[in-house]
Image (tube, rainbow, N blue to C red):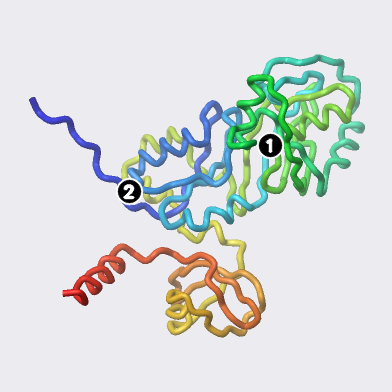
Amino acid sequence: MSAPRRPPPRRRVDGVLLLDKPSGVTSNGALMRVKRLYNAQKAGHTGTLDPLASGLLPICFGAATRFAQFLLDASKRYTAIARFGVTTTTLDAEGDVVASRPVTFDRDALLGALARFTGPRVQIPPAHSALKFKGRPYYDYARKGIDFPRAPREITIHSLELTEWNAPDAILDVECSKGTYIRVLADELGEALGCGAHLAALRRTGSGGFSVRDAVSLDALHSMDAEALQRCLQSIDAPLASMQRLDVDVDTSTALVQGRRPATTTHDGTYRVYESARFLGVAESIAGRLQVARLVPAPLASRESIASDADASHR
């Protein structure tokens, strides 16, 4: 009897995939499927989408994971359907109906409410969420009917526009800061208009400088060969496209890699740094000195060379 075939060893993959996540799949579930398709050693997504939601989910592989935080911190854009007149336990279409009320406001009243919700504000996260209190996710307490404190968070609604109004549904275009819960926004709008509301559907259309128009679906990825999968990957510095660029010479790049703080004439700030078009990482200019924030990991060949040299020195 032949031994069972072992799966091929995971390989190093570096880059950013713009995935168009389907609804009905968790963000982590989508990540695992993509990671298997690429047979990648290391990967992570950059901002959870609820199972109900679809749309842009950037996935960072390998060295790109070092810069994932910049996408996590970036503003997001959504197309949302708020359904007025019905509130639910989870504030979205997956929850049980709590109450139903007539929808009596008109388009002008809705536009007025949208204007009041634009700008900086404080939002209390929903009880049914993956945030944690004392090491347990909120939804664990909520499902058991246990009351617990939910810390409010400061968010910003950069823009909130009405795309279509067909009572009781409003299609909204929302651009907001990280950490914003669109289902909480729908619920708050419903209360402000006196009839309640819940989030009927959600699609993320943008994250940082990326657009869902450039994303690829799971079904499309499953039909691709290895070369086509590789062509779908963006460079590891793609999440930093909006950051200031700084080109340095060999001496400066060497100093940064060695952990030193070379002198610079640049203004204070954060930069994506290159040497001869080679991306080095992110550095901060502080009072005339450059300081490393995140570096690209050394290529495997370089690591092996360093290891060989170190072994030789001990012989």
**Residue pointed to by mark 1:** 79
Q: Residue at x 76, y 16 (%)?
A: 98
> Closer to the camera, 219 or 39?
39
Provide the secondary structure element on which disc 1 rests.
strand
Residue 282 position, x and y percent, is 53, 67
**Amino acid at circle 1:** Thr
Residue 223 position, x and y percent, is 36, 35
- The vertical placement of 220 against 144, above or below, is below
**Residue pointed to by mark 2:** 227
Residue 100 position, x and y percent, is 81, 14
Residue 271 left/right relative to 255: right
Q: Residue at x 37, y 66 (%)?
A: 298
> Closer to the camera, 242 or 153?
153
Q: Residue at x 47, y 50 (%)?
A: 60
Residue 243 bears which disc, if any? none
**Which quadrant would the N terminus be assigned to in this image?**
top left
